Image (spheres, grey):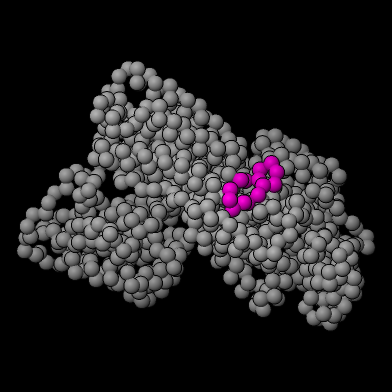
């Protein structure tokens, strides 16, 4: 049964006071997170909210800290974005209200923040509790006309106010406080010790100020990160997730943990044939389809703890404006040309047919429902003219060949500039091997003009006379989505994208997408003659297979994003397994038995065991207070110094792996450091005997081990952020930065620092579950050696011909 905690609340707290806001915070949090609490009124003005923790011989005296403590008890971790929101409330919002700033000023600040924060409608974070409580009085008293000017704030505030826990929290806070002084109550028992934090400031990770756009800092390192824009016509599977968004998230979190100014941008790619096709299948408009799948993708990535600075979409006015601007400059600079190409045309509904709108019999396997771009049965890549008895997907009518005028990007004219740029960038940026090989293959075969327009309705319109019924082809404008999504994040987007001397661009994707990022998009940038920020480093992956076969949503084969969530296994375990199996140099396999083994034998037995063993020991033997670890005998100090030097060597190797975007190897270094921690405990025989017979040596072992755990929390943060947050919560410390290799790590948790209570980082998974999950997500799968490589084909043309890409480089973006 959960222990009932005593919560002391000042009895004199007018609604307009800061004290009432603090009382409201803790009352709402206790209700929201189902924490059993005994409320106790404290007489007198000027008192503060206090949570007594008798078993730990300390108390919490800060309302925001109590909210976070309750959220941990309720199973909700506080991530980096949450900490930034809480810090913003403490440093900007609350002082502005207490200073008497007008309501419209306050609401303007909050409207801007909430519109960017991405609060869930179904889940409430600790930061939302803090913000709601601080805003409660001023917002509830505001006129409807004033609130209507701030739609994001109004919607969020009313939604929160109408929740059951919101109502109960407000009622409880009102019941515990009063406008007038009450009769004094018997003196409350004083806690034995405050929840003291003694941590070196130089060790702390910098938390960005929310409400302010992240912009490049002149003279400093600025990192811009993108992951391939996922297409909106499907649910992402594990291969999609590790191939781009998760890998980019690790690198983004790593840079932020180094206190490097970093912006991570992504969003859904929403224009093109695939959207129109899927909309037909689901009997909705393309926009309705995009709205549905954008939310689906966003929610899945949030569950996986993917921390985009902005997750946008391409169906925006900014996308149209920027794509058309690039197109126009290419046209003006002589890099675009008109030509004709032969396409299939449906006379019944009077329109040209994109590849996916043509169906017929596959010439390779005789499957009768093959598409114009690929046969789903045999996997063969097709041209719509290859199909036997082709028919229109929309109305079943037999199409006829017809010529259509289109615009071609003259890559042949840009080849020399692309070659010169790619050679320099790949050397300076250390491109991944397959990124270099695919790019060199394209350039070696010679670039040719490629069509960048299509006869579709759903897309960015072509800004030329007589082309009103055509749109830009998705592989031309998809990469421009990175720019437009940044423009929707900040009006100062050019500081990121027109700043090549001060910004390094890192891009993450599966290998299918390489030529669009190393040839076509940079070629378009070069052709405008504008000072674009171009690719510095490309990180690509091979294929993640599922149990030696292919993922298939239609056949129920493989684990997709929503399936992972439904298993009940925490995101940290999924992240660890996927990153430990990241297909960096060749295809890898998702295997359920290996998944369970890695959780039990690596996460639980290595990392979890080390952290839990040390913190439990300090809880039990030192009343959760770090002892003076500086008085160990000289020979012990020398041994510990040698251990630290060995760990600093491994730290340097970890940093080198991450700097060069070798994410899987970096994770291996992290687990090796944790393993050395376990070895250190064994060598020093940390137990009751050491505590009783050699107190100074025991204190030194504990001090070194706790500070190593603090370092491990920082190294864990890029890979398993929720686990890192759990560790620092147990250490009662802020997020730690990853130290530079030159400075190494040292004692940052000082003697006298009070840590929190030990909690398990991981749980054992029953080995039998592996067979259950394998059967559940097995479908009717045929085993194959490798996932097929997509190879696009241009339409047949009467005059101009476009480049046929090399065999290992597809011509359509695999989003």
| Residue 2 belongs to the span the image colors magenta | no
* Labels in figure, total: 0
Image quarter hosting the C terminus: bottom right
| Quadrant hosting residue 683 | top left
Residue 584 part of the magenta-drawn span: yes
Residue 52, position as x, y percentages in the image: 20, 52
Which x, y percent locates residue 291?
A: 59, 70
Which residue does the image show at 35% across and 17% down from the upper left? 635
Which quadrant would the N terminus be assigned to in this image? bottom left
Q: Residue furthest top?
A: 634
Look at the image and tell me whether residue 580 can be seen: yes
Direction from residue 27 to residue 88 in the image, left or right: right
- Position of 572 compared to 812: left or right? left
Task: Using the image, determine if residue 436 lies above or below residue 461.
Answer: above
Query: x%, y% of residue 699?
Result: 29, 29
- Camera-side residue of 521 and 680: 680
């Amino acid at each position: 049964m959960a222990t009932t905690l005593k919560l002391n609340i000042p009895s004199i707290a007018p609604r307009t006071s800061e004290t009432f806001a603090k009382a409201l915070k803790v009352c709402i949090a206790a209700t929201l997170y189902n924490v059993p609490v005994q409320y106790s009124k404290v007489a007198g003005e000027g008192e503060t909210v206090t949570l007594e923790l008798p078993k730990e011989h300390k108390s919490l005296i800060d309302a925001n800290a109590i909210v976070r403590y309750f959220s941990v008890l309720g199973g909700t971790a506080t991530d980096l974005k949450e900490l930034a929101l809480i810090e913003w409330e403490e440093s900007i919002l609350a002082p502005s209200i207490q200073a008497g700033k007008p309501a419209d000023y306050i609401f303007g600040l909050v409207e801007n923040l909430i519109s960017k924060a991405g609060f869930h409608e179904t889940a409430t974070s600790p930061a939302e509790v803090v913000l709601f409580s601080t805003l409660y009085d001023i917002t509830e008293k505001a006129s409807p006309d004033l609130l209507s000017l701030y739609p994001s704030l109004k919607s969020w505030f009313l939604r929160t106010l109408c929740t059951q826990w919101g109502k109960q929290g407000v009622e409880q806070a009102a019941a515990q406080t009063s406008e007038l002084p009450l009769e004094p109550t018997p003196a409350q028992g004083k806690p034995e010790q405050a929840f003291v934090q003694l941590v070196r400031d130089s060790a702390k990770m910098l938390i960005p100020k929310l409400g302010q756009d992240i912009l490049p800092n002149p003279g400093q390192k600025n990192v811009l990160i993108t992951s391939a824009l996922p297409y909106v016509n499907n649910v992402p599977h594990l291969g999609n997730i590790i191939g781009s968004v998760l890998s980019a998230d690790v690198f983004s979190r790593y840079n932020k943990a180094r206190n490097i100014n970093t912006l991570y941008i992504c969003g859904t790619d929403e224009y093109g044939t695939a959207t129109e096709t899927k909309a037909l299948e689901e009997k909705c408009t393309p926009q309705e389809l995009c709205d549905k799948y954008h939310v689906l993708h966003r929610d899945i990535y949030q569950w996986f703890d993917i921390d985009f600075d902005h997750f946008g979409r391409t169906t925006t006015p900014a996308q149209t404006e920027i794509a058309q601007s690039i197109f126009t400059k290419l046209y003006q600079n002589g890099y675009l040309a008109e030509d004709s190409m032969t396409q299939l045309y449906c006379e019944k509904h009077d329109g040209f047919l994109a590849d996916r709108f043509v169906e017929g019999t596959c010439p390779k396997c005789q499957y009768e429902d093959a598409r114009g771009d690929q046969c789903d049965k045999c996997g063969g890549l097709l041209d719509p003219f290859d199909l036997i008895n082709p028919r229109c997907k929309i109305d079943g009518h037999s199409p006829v060949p017809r010529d259509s005028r289109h615009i071609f990007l003259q890559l042949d004219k840009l080849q020399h500039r692309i070659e010169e740029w790619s050679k320099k960038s790949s050397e300076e940026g250390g491109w991944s091997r397959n990124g270099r090989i695919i790019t060199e293959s394209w350039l070696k075969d010679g670039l040719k003009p490629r069509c960048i327009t299509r006869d579709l309705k759903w897309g960015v319109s072509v800004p030329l006379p007589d082309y009103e019924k055509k749109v830009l082809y998705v592989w031309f404008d998809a990469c421009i989505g990175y720019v437009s999504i940044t423009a929707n994040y900040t009006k100062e987007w050019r500081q990121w994208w027109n700043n090549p001397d001060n910004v390094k661009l890192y891009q993450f994707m599966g290998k299918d997408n390489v030529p669009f990022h190393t040839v076509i998009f940079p070629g378009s940038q070069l052709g405008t003659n504008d000072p674009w920020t171009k690719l510095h480093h490309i990180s690509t992956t091979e294929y993640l297979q599922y149990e030696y076969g292919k993922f298939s949503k239609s056949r129920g084969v493989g684990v997709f994003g929503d399936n992972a969530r439904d298993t009940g296994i925490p995101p940290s375990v999924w992240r660890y397994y996927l990153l430990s199996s990241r297909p960096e140099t060749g295809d890898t396999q998702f295997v359920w038995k290996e998944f369970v083994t890695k959780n039990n034998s690596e996460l639980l037995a290595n990392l979890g065991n080390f952290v839990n063993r040390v913190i439990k020991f300090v809880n039990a033997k030192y009343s959760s207070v770090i002892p003076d670890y500086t008085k160990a005998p000289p020979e012990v100090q020398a041994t510990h110094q040698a251990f630290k030097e060995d760990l600093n060597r491994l730290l340097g190797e970890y940093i080198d792996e991450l700097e060069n975007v070798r994410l899987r190897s970096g994770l291996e270094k992290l687990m090796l450091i944790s393993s050395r921690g376990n070895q250190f405990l064994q060598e020093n025989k940390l137990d009751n005997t050491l505590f009783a017979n050699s107190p100074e040596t025991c204190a030194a072992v504990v001090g070194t081990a706790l500070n190593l755990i603090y370092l491990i929390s920082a190294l864990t943060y890029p890979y398993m952020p929720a686990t890192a947050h759990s560790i620092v919560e147990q250490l009662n410390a802020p997020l730690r930065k990853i130290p530079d290799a030159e400075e190494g790590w040292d004692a940052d948790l000082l003697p006298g620092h009070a840590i929190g209570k030990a909690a398990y980082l991981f749980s054992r998974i029953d080995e039998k579950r592996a067979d259950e999950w394998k059967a559940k997500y097995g479908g009717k799968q045929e085993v194959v050696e490798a996932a097929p490589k997509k190879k696009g084909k241009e339409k047949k043309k009467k005059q101009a011909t476009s480049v046929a890409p090399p065999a290992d480089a597809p011509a359509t973006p695999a989003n």
